[in-house]
Image (tube, rainbow, N blue to C red):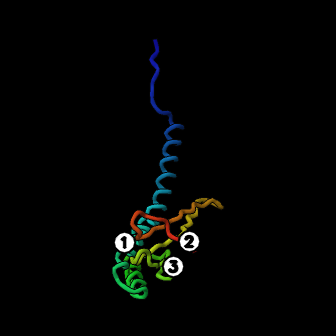
Amino acid sequence: MQQRQDGISLVGLIFVLALVGMVLVLGLKIVPTYTEYRAIQNAIVTAKSAGSVVEIQKSFDASAVAGYISSINSRDLIIEKIDGQTEISFAYEKKIPLVGPASLLLEYEGTTVKGGAKPAKE
């Protein structure tokens, strides 16, 4: 009586490793853009307390230099008064080239408005 072995074949192992490798490479490309997004979120929260529009922009630019933010600058921020409060919003896209003509488009947006209302698009 012959026993049947269970397990993964060499072809199956190669396929799984290739799939894991692709996911890892994709993750290594996405994580820096998300880290930059979080830095922008923190920068607008910090800049909100600066006061006037010019001071908010200067505060954001200082945070952008310190936080290696290159996707947007202070002129891209939407600064407006809502119910007597200064609120800051932003929206931008990040395109990550993958293979040949294929690319991944990530759309980031954020605001200091309580409740997380979407920023007004220009």
Report the quarter where the C terminus lies.
Answer: bottom right
Which of pointers 2 and 1 indicates the residue nearer the eye?
2
Q: Earlier in the sequence, mark 1 or mark 3?
A: 1
Question: Which residue is tagged 1?
Answer: 42
Dot 3 falls on a residue whose secondary structure is: helix
Image disc number at residue 121: 2
Dot 1 falls on a residue whose secondary structure is: helix
Question: Which residue is tagged 3?
Answer: 76
Quarter of the image for residue 87 reads: bottom left
Labels 2 and 3 touching (C-beta < 8 A): no
Distance of label 2 from label 3 (alpha carbons): 11 Å
Q: Residue at x 66, y 61 (%)?
A: 101
Which of pointers 2 and 3 indicates the residue nearer the eye?
2
Q: Residue at x 61, y 59 (%)?
A: 99
Q: Position of residue 42 (x, y in %)?
A: 37, 71
Dot 2 falls on a residue whose secondary structure is: loop
Q: Residues within 10 Å of mark 2 (few under 14, many from 20)?
A: few
* Residue nearest the viewer, comparing 84 with 29: 84
Q: Position of residue 61 (x, y in %)?
A: 42, 83
Badge 1 amino acid: Asn
Distance of label 2 from label 1 (alpha carbons): 20 Å
